[in-house]
Amino acid sequence: MAENTGQVDPNVGTIDAGDKGQSAPVALIDAEGNFSEKWYDSELLEEGVRGDASLVTVKNLNNFCKSHIHQRKMVGQDQIAIPGTHSTPDDWTAFHKAGGMPDSAEEYGFTRPEEMPEEMYDADFAKSAAEKIHELGGNTKLAQGMFQFWNEYVAGLHKTQAQDAQAEAEQRKHDFYSKYGNQAEEKLHIGNIALERASGDDEEFKNRMIEKYGDDPDFNQLLINFGDKFVEHKLIDFKTTTQSVDDIQTEIDEIRANPAFVDEMNPAYKAMQAKMTSLYLRRSKAKAAG
């Protein structure tokens, strides 16, 4: 009878349990390094490892070690280990660089697109955004995509705001001409005379006011208020404010040349029509008086 040692018998591949009467688990490997049949289903392997399909093709210890070494060499080339909870900042940096993160935020190359006006581009924001993306490990493709998305969003926002402002201005202009009807242009003429009187000899000041506010309905309302006060206090002789037929005709020609005059879908269409009606009446009065 063989001596009970409790050791692995390399010739049999089992463990001798002695006289305890207990069955011993089959050894996973023999003396030549070969794994036993269906070793990957052994109870010696913990759950989650036991029975994994990737182990089926592993037949001996030598092949298992070579596979492990090969996988380790691949790290940092085509593959890289994904950092976990206990990874160091250097681990994360290596991971992000392997994914395409440049050495510095400047290498993302954030610059103002040629089609974007300078006043619309926020260089300080672009710089801060690049730094934050780099801090978070973003690669160049991601950074450029986010930069393009932001620029397109800002451009669309400015366009919408400009359209809304234009529509609001046209509506106020329409309301202005609807309020004064045929008297609108005449009152504006008087208001312009009042502005000239109030500006004194400062022609530059008057031009700046007109350049800034131009045809703004609120500014026109202010001109009319000025004109009414000047006439009320006899600072303007109303008889001298009448425009000549040629002056009125010039205004008529300018309106006719404006595309909004014939475009019923244009927000300024109604205001243009009202203004033209007013000019026609004033021209008739001027011809009759002339």
Image (cartoon, grey):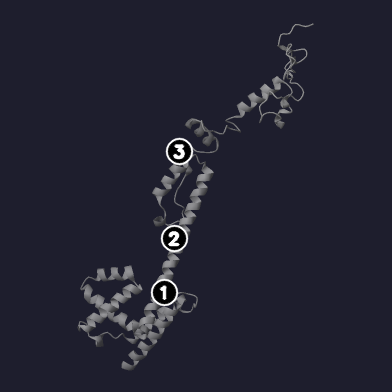
Indicate the quadrant containing the C terminus: top left, top right, bottom left or bottom right. Answer: bottom left
Residue at point 48%, 49% (across, down): 147
Q: CA distance from mark 1 to mark 2?
A: 20 Å
For the residue pair 94 and 16, the one nearer the viewer reads as 16
First-in-chain label (2 vs 3): 3
- Residue 198, compared with residue 148, is above or below; it is below
Q: Residues within 10 Å of mark 3 (few under 14, many from 20)?
A: few
Q: Which mark is residue 158?
A: 2
**Looking at the picture, which amino acid does disc 2 mark?**
His
Q: Which mark is residue 104?
A: 3
- The quarter holding residue 3 reads top right
- Going by the image, does 100 lie left or right of 268? right
First-in-chain label (1 vs 3): 3
**Looking at the picture, which amino acid does disc 3 mark?**
Ser
- Residue 101, compared with residue 229, is above or below; it is above
Indicate the quadrant containing the N terminus: top left, top right, bottom left or bottom right. Answer: top right
- Per the image, the residue denoted by label 1 is 171
**Looking at the picture, which amino acid does disc 1 mark?**
Gln
Residue 178 locus on image (x, y percent): 39, 81
**What secondary structure is found at the residue carrying circle 1?**
helix
